[in-house]
């Protein structure tokens, strides 16, 4: 049950109450395989339907450990030169996949009127750090080369993703800033990211129980992922975030990760990066893929995507 001292939207409260009635075990109790099934089941229960698009097809690109599965979306059968979105899904580096994020990627394609490529990076614990950032960087560099498989000339990248995918968004952007790819990252757009050590923040203790994502689950994800927290490809804020491209970032007001996103946004602003920061009150982690159960989150998502669109328009003018 959500703590009454915090503002909780009516639809969020209804969703949390429903989950409490259903019961069930956390991912840290059931393990990776069952946790992946739980996330797929949650999609069927709580996520909005996908948009029908003229182009939605599965592809692969070369990766450091073999081909990386991708899914390509576009609202147009044919398109001239322009930017492309690389979307990196969440799930604690352990759960989540292209299918869980299918509807959200169609929303990106429709709202931004851009091609979108969703990447199926390798997951822990079978493939611990640095498998995920290695795959995401490889996919970004492949995309930046305007591969023939897309039939599009790519002039720049928009990199986005949520939670663990928000972490990988920042890490991938930093890698392509430090060692440029075929085209630049025009905008990075992390959604409630893991940018710093989350357990030190007030939000972790305030919202670590009763608001969907728990502190116990986060600790378990961190253990499964492995790696060194002092490595900037693991915890991006320990590294040099200089020369970061224009950034759109959002957090959820009832999220254990909220303060990590706040800290990252403030850090970028302090170094002079152009930042649009949204903190959506009364809503929980994961709302972008819970829009059937939490319909108020649709407007938040539209605000976030609108800010990306505005930044791209300004860059093009």
Image (cartoon, helix red, strand yellow):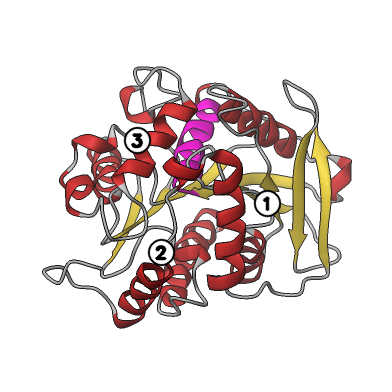
Locate the C terminus and report the quarter of the image it occupies: bottom right
Label 3 sits on residue:
219
Q: Secondary structure at mark 1?
A: loop
Residue at point 45%, 41% (across, down): 245
Q: Is residue 69 left or right of residue 35?
A: right
Q: Nearer the viewer, residue 214 or 287?
A: 214
User: Which span of residues is magenta-colored?
Assistant: 162-177
Identify the disc placed on residue 23.
2
* Vertical placement of residue 305 versus 82, above or below: below
**Residue 243 appears in the picture as rendered:** no
Q: Nearer the viewer, residue 77 or 22?
A: 22
Examine the structure image and report whether residue 215 is included in the region drawn in magenta.
no
Mark 3 or 2: in front is 2
Residue at point 64%, 66% (across, down): 103
Q: Secondary structure at mark 3?
A: helix
As measured in the structure, the alpha-carbon distance from the residue carrying label 1 to the one carrying label 3 is 24 Å
Q: Position of residue 192 (x, y in %)?
A: 38, 51
Identify the disc placed on residue 216.
none
Q: Nearer the viewer, residue 15 or 151?
A: 15
Residue at point 41%, 64% (across, down): 23
Q: Can you tell which quarter of the image residue 2 is in?
A: bottom left
Locate the N terminus and report the quarter of the image it occupies: bottom left
As measured in the structure, the alpha-carbon distance from the residue carrying label 3 to the one carrying label 2 is 21 Å
**Residue 71 appears in the picture as rendered:** yes
Q: Is residue 46 left or right of residue 86?
A: left
């Amino acid at each position: 049950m959500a703590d009454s001292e915090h503002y909780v939207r009516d639809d969020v409260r209804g969703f949390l109450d429903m989950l409490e009635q259903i019961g069930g075990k956390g991912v840290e109790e059931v393990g990776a395989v069952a946790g992946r099934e739980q996330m797929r089941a949650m999609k069927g229960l709580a996520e909005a339907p996908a948009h029908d698009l003229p182009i939605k097809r599965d592809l692969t690109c070369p990766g450091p450990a073999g081909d990386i599965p991708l899914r390509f979306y576009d609202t147009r059968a044919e398109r001239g030169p322009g930017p492309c979105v690389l979307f990196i899904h969440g799930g604690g580096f352990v759960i989540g996949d292209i299918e869980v994020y299918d509807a959200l990627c169609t929303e990106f394609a429709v709202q931004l009127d851009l091609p979108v490529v969703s990447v199926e990076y390798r997951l822990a614990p079978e493939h611990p750090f640095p498998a995920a950032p290695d795959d995401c960087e490889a996919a970004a560099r492949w995309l930046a080369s305007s591969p023939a498989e897309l039939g599009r000339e790519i002039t720049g990248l928009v990199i986005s993703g949520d939670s663990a995918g928000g972490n990988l968004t920042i890490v991938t952007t930093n890698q392509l800033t430090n060692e440029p790819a075929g085209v630049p990252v025009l905008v990075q757009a992390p959604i409630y990211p893991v940018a710093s050590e989350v357990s030190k923040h007030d939000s972790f203790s305030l919202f670590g129980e009763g608001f969907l994502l728990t502190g116990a689950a986060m600790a378990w994800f961190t253990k499964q992922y492995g790696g060194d927290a002092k490595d900037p490809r693991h915890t991006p804020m320990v590294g040099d975030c200089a020369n970061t491209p224009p950034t759109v970032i959002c957090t959820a007001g009832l999220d254990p990760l909220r303060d990590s996103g706040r800290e990252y946004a403030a850090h970028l602003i302090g170094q002079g990066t152009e930042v649009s920061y949204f903190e959506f009150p009364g809503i929980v982690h994961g709302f972008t893929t819970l829009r059937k159960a939490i319909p108020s989150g649709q407007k938040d998502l539209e605000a976030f995507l609108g800010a990306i669109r505005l930044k791209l328009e300004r860059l093009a003018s």
